[in-house]
Image: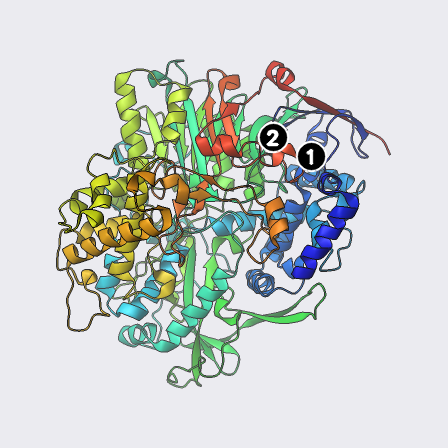
Amino acid sequence: MTAVVVVVVLVATTLGVTALIRRPLPQVSGALTLPGLEAEVTVTRDARGVPSIRATTSRDLFMAQGFTHAQDRFFEMDYRRHVTSGRVSELVGVNADALAADKVIRTFGWRRVAEQEWSILAEETREYLQAYADGVNAYLATRSAQGLGIEYTVLGLQVQVGEPEPWDPIDSVAWLKAMAWDLRGNFDEELARAETYSAVRDVDRVDELFPVYPESRNTPIVTPAELAAASTAGGGADDGALPVDPDTDLDTGTSPSTETSPSTETSPSTETSPSADAALLGSSALERAVAAAQRAIDAVPELLGSGEGVGSNSWVVAGEHTASGLPLLANDPHLSISAPGIWSQQSLRCANVGPLCPFDVSGFTFAGLPSVIIGHNADLAWGLTNLGADVTDFFVERLTDDGGYLYDGETRELDVRHEVILVNGGEPVELEIRSTGHGPILSDVFELDTTERAPVAPAPAMRTSELAVSLAWTALTPGRTADAVFAFARAATPADVAAAAALFEVPSQNIVFATVDGQIGYQAPGKIPVRKDVPDAAVPSDGTWPRPGWDPDYDWQGYVEPEQMPAVVDPPEGFIVAANQAVTPAETDTFLSVDWDYGYRSQRIRDLLTERIAEGPLTGADMSEIQLDAHSAFADVLVPWLLTISIDTEFDAAGQELLREWDRSMDTDSAAAVYLAAVWQNLLELTFHDELPEAQRPDGGSRWLEVVQAILDDPRASWWDDRTTVGVEEGRDEILYRALVGARAELTQRLGKDPADWSWGRLHLAAPEHAVLGGSSIPGPVRALMNPRPLGVAGGSSIVNANAWDAADPDGSFHVTASPSMRMVVDLANLDASMWVVMTGTSGHPGSRHYTDQFTAWATGETFPWPYSPTAVTRAARDTLTLRPGS
């Protein structure tokens, strides 16, 4: 890398730093010829570079959107398509992480599934995607690689960089697979249970670490009363009822996909008994297979984010509670932090909105995908949060040494395909991908040596077999989510939302919406598998544990019908909060999931809304203020216990004293906030690290708060005892004491002896990082160019202002791992009064002032005006570019 630094310095010296980084900046004013346009298109940009596109036809509109996305963020688009097709090694060269990612994504076959989806999409959707691709390619035709992004210049110092290949519509469709992957539900918890069991060897103790959702304290999104009273005019739950037994779906004629379920037969497996299955699932052979699958999962790049911090807040308030008399809607998706930020703001308007050109929509887009993902049109606003439905299952497969796998007492042939991964500057890598009827075998991705491939005992009349782990996932079946993206952009009524939701198969999202006519609502979409209740099962059959692949009783039995998904319109309460908590009470939810965010954020939002409604009508400013709430549920639970602990010395007690008068808000200037965070990190380490595998150490999110809250009442709970201190049995008070004193010592070393000098913002930093040129292995001058300067931020995990951090970080860092990637508040009474902000800025070019011009505002909780009407857009315009037809 030293050579790279030298070359970069030489290039900068020769060309000039300014010229080098400004070369990719696009033309944003004047006029350009865009071959393929049917008529002139106008693109105005406001003070933050946000484009508003006005076109005569839908084709021109999306062609211009592709053009402007490529202007602002082509390298990001190019990187995303290399990831989703398993071709990162072609872009960055010989790199172990890139090759690992390519292997896993090729095993999944994201690109292959996207290609299969093309033929089932609506004709108009295909036309829009093609128009978008044409716009991207029109821009590519005007520039060399080095003129598209400084990333190509830097990469060109290490690998051969050719001209980027043309954009293909499938590149856009494949992005939806990455979106689905990062928002996939209880995937992590399922493997976590298996890995945790391998360490503690006790199902009951595993269950203690995955407690049930606390309905008595944290309200689900939709209550039974709301389900019963809900208007179903626009679709949603049939008569407010959800199926109470998944088997009833078998009578509807819903058949499982042949790609994800090999059989609908329900005869029990004759190959092993339940007791034998249970022994097998606790075997060391399975532990190795699960570990291999976990390694494969960890290799996939996090384009949107992963872990407990990835979620979102959304809520909508009816006009009866607002100053304007019409609804207010708020949304702030919690995703990973990156430079540039995940979202790109845009407005898309047909000059004459009608059947031939029906779009008049503004909001947040993904560079590389046409239309708007979250936002509003002239009639309706909508927000999304991750529903977290269980749409994946790991199947433990018994493979035979003759190339088959066991299923229902018989041997079946594995599906085998071969692919070649091209490596820029290196040798091609051949990959063999094996799949069962359930899905691809993830534990194959990384080769295990002969000692790790320990076989399990031979089955009766079967040859020796070994265990493997395959993945069934709804996103690996072709679907119509791309159709849904455009349907939401045109939706005007609750019925339109329900119809769009029926197409929105993956990822499963909570949808809150409001109309300019005054209606508010909630709709759950998604392709949700039906699982059979298996009596006397060796492992739970509800999707919370890996499933025996050899037993057909564990196969998916079909999918939930869209009209059976939870929905409510105009609830009596007058507001709806959807923040990743349970969707409905457990007794009415028989198919969505049992693994939810534990609802501390959602309940805090509900409480704040209830309080403010009692004080008077709500305004948009109230909604923004709630988004910034930093009150800590961790403090509510922990501080009363921590203050009961007696600390001997004045020095050690100085940290504890901070907690006595603290308002329990994780503000940037708060010394008590950083002290509590350090105590929490120590508490989790002292309590759980001695028993759990490294990959399952507590991240400190809502699940772990629920776990600790349960054991605080038991001073001799087994988790308190440190298994590494032989002959000594620690209890609760000893662990709390050590956590308090240890935090005081740690912060003294990091922030100084005097607690008055401490503050949360000094350690809790938001540090957006470029996906390719931002990591620690990249030379410092390049990192400094690509990565914005870190900023201290308020909030934390499971807090409304959800700037999450990872308590299991081996370096003890409090840096932000996921955060509100944008914030929006939509005023349905006056759409021009709506407000928005993204994490960094609209541009993907570090030479542009719009690369980071929203970062400070985002960090401090500011938002910007969101012009929507033609008059407001014209008034806000700082640059105007006319795109003209021509050859």
Q: CA distance from mark 1 to mark 2?
A: 9 Å
Q: Nearer the viewer, residue 840 or 373?
A: 840
- Secondary structure at badge 1 equals helix
Q: Cβ–Cβ below 8 Å for labels 1 and 2?
A: yes
Quadrant housing residue 554: bottom left
Within 10 angstroms of label 2, few (less than 14), some, or many (20 or more) residues?
many
Can you identify the residue that label 1 sits on?
Answer: 68
Which amino acid lies under the numbered mark 2 shown in the image of this protein?
A: Gln
Residue 44 image offset from top left, x and y in percent:
68, 24
Quarter of the image where the C terminus is located: top right
Residue 577, label in figure = none
Quadrant housing residue 843: top right
Tag count:
2
Q: Earlier in the sequence, mark 1 or mark 2?
A: 1
Residue 767 image offset from top left, x and y in percent:
50, 44
Within 10 angstroms of label 1, few (less than 14), some, or many (20 or more) residues?
many
Which amino acid lies under the numbered mark 1 shown in the image of this protein?
A: Thr
Q: Nearer the viewer, residue 412 or 163?
A: 163
Q: Is residue 771 above or below residue 458?
A: above
Classify residue 344 as left or right of residue 597: right
Way the structure is coloured: rainbow
Residue 300 image offset from top left, x and y in percent:
53, 58
Can you identify the residue that label 2 sits on?
Answer: 346
Q: Nearer the viewer, residue 566 or 432?
A: 432
Can see residue 119? Answer: no
Q: Is residue 481 above or below residue 620?
A: below
Classify residue 635 as left or right of residue 324: left
- Secondary structure at badge 2 equals strand
Classify residue 682 as left or right of residue 411: left
Quarter of the image where the N terminus is located: bottom right
Q: Nearer the viewer, residue 650 or 447?
A: 650
